[in-house]
Image: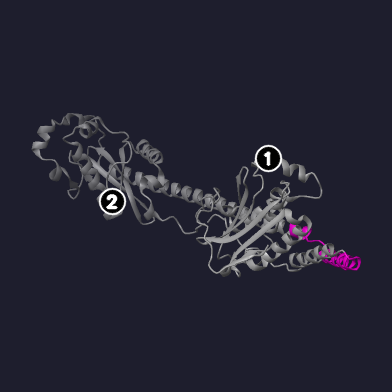
Amino acid sequence: MKRQIYSEGSNFADAQSTADVCPPVRAEKQHSPVDLNQFDIVHLFGKEKLEDIQRTISKVTGLAFVTVDFKGEPVTEATYFSKFCWCMRKNPITEQICWSSDAYGAVQGTIRKKPSVYFCPCGLLEVAIPLIVRGHYLGGFIGGQVVCHDAPEGVVHLDKILMRPDIQQEANIDYELQDEMTKLTYDQFINVVDLAAMIINQLTESELAKFEKSRDEKRDIEELEREIDELRYQNKLKSLEISSMNYARHPQFIINTMTSIANLAIVEGAEETSEAAIKFSEYMKSLYLDRSDFWTMEKELDNVELYLEIQKIRMGDRLNYSIELPGNMRMQRIPSNTLPVFVEQAIIHGVGLKEEGGTVLVRVGTDGEDVVIYVEDDGPGYTNEQFEEIYGRLDNNDSCGVSQSVEVMSRRMRILFGREYDVTTEVTEGTGRRVCIRYPKYLDEGVRQNVSNPNRRR
């Protein structure tokens, strides 16, 4: 049978692609410091950790505290709050006033970058301790609820701004509850504030150091995983090279032997034997003396046709074949010796399993940015289980290891181009099998030598 050459490329848009895909990739390791612009106070420390810090400060200082974000909104549960302040914050009339007071403290902390002392709308001394990490304001700790009678005149009184007499009357505020609250002089309060600020700064730096350490350890683990993946990939390439070297051992001896057999067949008048020996010798030369990892599609199909001609001499009319190659794909590059093993497989279960013989069809085309090659036969179309059973019997015979060769070649394609380029097989019972070999049209021919894994996580 002659190869059919087309002037325009075929497009197999209906080709079945593999279901396997490469796993989602990971981000490449970065060594830059933590970008605090990407974090808020809760995401950096966590709500539970903030509440732990808050409870520690309250326990040491005896002051009530709540943590707010950079907008002044509470992000934790309050600790050590007095009964008076609980009532104020639960009262729907005064609740917003308390939040506004917290927001004022947060704003002052943002502006001043240091603790800000003020009287809340109910006349209690408060402090806003800003949480500033490496120059970034993330929020703050609002605390106090202290009765103080000797504060300097310069301390801001928010009752003059936020607490109107009509609100006090409508809210029915019970100021007698303030008698139960902590009473400190202004100097005592400032000393407590200094202690709280020191604790907050130390705990903040400690937590940030833990966060950065955890982040770095995670990235180190990811880098090690990438290196392990790369080593596994390079090991697979070496295994393929070793398999190839074992398969190609002493090719010149085989070629010379076949040439001698061909010459002897001519002398004895065995023309078919001579023709088969000569073609086999040519096939071996192309297969083993050219050690290129990639060559043209035309050369690949020349080898396929040589192999089919040899098989046709052996099988006669029981074997028919057709090779379809678009003219514009003659120079398309392909990993060397990819197709013969699949053609051999098609002959075994397409022709060998039918008494009347059969046909092998090799078609080359494109699907988008991929080269697609189909190797088809019109055999009985056994299911995978039936086919594996047949191959199991054949593989027990030392003369045939086709299934192993098919798996090696399929693995080679996965390693070279990724899991999505695994070889696929479509079986139609009673009609035959169709093998699909797919790979990128624009391939990198340096992929076999000291290259990165194409599936490597980045």
Q: Is residue 204 above or below residue 302?
A: above
- Look at the picture and state if 372 lies above or below 260: above
Kindly report the distance in space between the C-alpha atoms of the residues bearing marks 2 and 1: 77 Å
Name the amino acid, label 1.
Answer: Gln
Question: Residue 83 vs residue 337: left or right?
Answer: left
Give x and y (percent) for residue 223: 57, 54
Judging by the rendered image, the residue that carries numbered circle 1 is: 386
Q: Name the residue rendered at 81%, 50% in the picture.
A: 399
Residue designated by label 2: 109
- Snapshot colouring: one colour
Residue 162 falls in image quadrant: top left
What residue type is disc 2 on?
Gly
Q: Is residue 30 magenta?
A: no
Judged by its main secondary structure, the magenta piece is helix
Residue, far left: 166
CB within 8 Å, label 2 to label 1: no
On screen, residue 388 versus residue 42, left or right, reads: right
Q: What residue range appears in magenta?
A: 242-269
Q: Earlier in the sequence, mark 2 or mark 1?
A: 2
Q: Nearer the viewer, residue 212 or 160?
A: 212
Is residue 194 in view?
yes
Residue drawn 24% across the image and 32% down it: 86
Which residue is drawn at the image coordinates 74% and 64% (left, top)?
287
Q: Secondary structure at mark 2?
A: helix
In the rendered image, is residue 235 in sight? no
